[in-house]
Amino acid sequence: MTDTDTDTGPGTGTGTRAGRGTATHRRAAAAALLLALAVTTACPAAAATAAAGRPPAGPVGIWQLDGYGTVLRVESGRLQEYQVTGISCLPGASARRVLDSGSAAAFRYATEDHEVFTVRPGSVHVEGSVGDRATRRLGALPERCREAQEPGPAADPVATFDVFWQTFAENYPFFAAKGVDWNAVRESHRPRVHAGTTEDELFAVFEEMLAPLHDAHVRLVGGDRRFGEVRPGTVMPTLELETRVKAYIQEVDLGGHAPQEFAQGRISYADLPDGRGYLRLSGFGGYTESGDFASESAELDRALESVFTAERTARLRGLVIDLRINGGGSDELGLRLAARLTDRPYFAYAKRVRNDPADATRFTRPQPLYVHPARGPRYTGPIAVLTGGSTVSAGETFTQALLERPGRTVRIGEPTQGVFSDVLGRALPNGWELGLPNEQFLTRTGKTFDGPGIPVDVRTPVFTQEEFDAHRDSAFTAALRRLPRA
């Protein structure tokens, strides 16, 4: 249904999504599109209620999500997802209840891909994603879904084109911001597709249609074919880039001293001279082999407990948080780190989803999310956050969650990539997989950074060839200049 987020860095994430197979794209560009929502189980009481003509009190029944183009059918201990547009209904994933929430009105579920979610009448919460997704009960399955056919390679290319175009037309929020007339794109490209169009030809048409969006949360997978793109002038995180950068930082910034490493090397920490610290995160996921949210969350907690000890937080004068190579993952894990950096609650961001298929300016009511102080030791002093074009997705929502942080916080480097939404996973009639954003993360004043990314306070080069050649890290140096010394 939806990916909670995708991670382009090494390892697995909770949204592969990415967060989450592997957390490489993009979030490269194609991580498997996973089920993010599901429901199941019926009980005798619910069956009796339904027989009496009243809807059951629990989550058994037919549910439509507000936004997301998704209908869920829950019956006889199984759930079936349907991916819906105005012209199509394709069966998505099915699931079964596997975890007991301890409540008759709230059930927990897990997919084969380790996605865990809680279903209540009226809402679904996906672990690793922030906020809840509203649902409304339907009296029956939409007629088109009653005859839904499984996607397969024999599908007509024209029908596949139409569902592809319609999916974006009904869900993508950023056409105006990207300067793309999606109706004109259809008029110019649909005549090139016919019953004899080959898969290679069709994929090339779709690539041409998607390329002008320059959106790192848009991806297409068709057999061995992959499409994914980033904002011009930026690069996506890769294992090769991260390996090079980690060695470079150790040599240039840390004086050859190896930092402490956690979470399969995705988190590292080093004490710096003059009472300062350096914390690097290459993603908010990919911390464990299994990649499930529970183990990822526990691994992050272990790392943070090792870093934010009572002794260290008492003596730290400043902290550098390096997100310059960060492929994203779980927004919820980002908020968990932010909770270690404040002693009082504050507004992080508000989340909303496009929910009118005919109007790209219509959204659900923004759902505010907050940072709440963690229990145990916290660091509340000055912070320098290093970002760049390879700061992606959950790396960006974490950066956004620091905008109103109490205490001095300065952003140094280059703007982030500019993609924040969870990735909505869709199947096309020919069996290809598609991912696109359909959400916005807003500041208190309603601003979104989708497209240009979150700006910095101090602009410096970030891992350019000139920086490498000069054996220099300008962003790191600028951070130390702006943090107090012991």
Image (cartoon, rainbow, N blue to C red):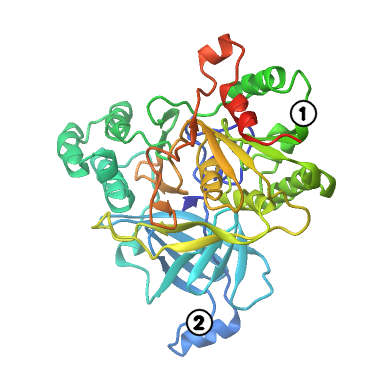
Q: Position of residue 481 (x, y in %)?
A: 62, 29
Q: Helix, strand, or loop for circle 1?
A: helix
Q: Position of residue 283 (x, y in %)?
A: 61, 38
The residue that mark 2 highlights is: 56
Question: What whole-number distance in Å separates the C-alpha atoms at marks 1 and 2?
Answer: 63 Å
Tag in front: 1 or 2? 1
Residue 166 higher or lower than 184, as above or below: below
Residues marked 1 and 2 touching at CB (< 8 Å) = no
Q: Residues within 10 Å of mark 1 (few under 14, many from 20)?
A: few
Q: Residue at x 56, y 31 (%)?
A: 324
Q: Position of residue 211 (x, y in %)?
A: 32, 31
Quadrant of the image occupied by residue 84: bottom left
Residue 191 higher or lower than 39, as above or below: above
Q: Residues within 10 Å of mark 2 (few under 14, many from 20)?
A: some
- Amino acid bearing label 1: Pro
Quadrant of the image occupied by residue 106: bottom right
Q: Helix, strand, or loop for circle 2?
A: loop
Query: Where does the C terminus fall, quadrant-wise?
Result: top right
* Lateral position of residue 445 relative to residue 119, left or right: left
Does the rendering let one see residue 320?
yes
Q: Nearer the viewer, residue 220 or 333?
A: 333
Marking on residue 273? 1
Does the rendering let one see residue 272?
no
Q: Residue at x 41, y 55 (%)?
A: 91
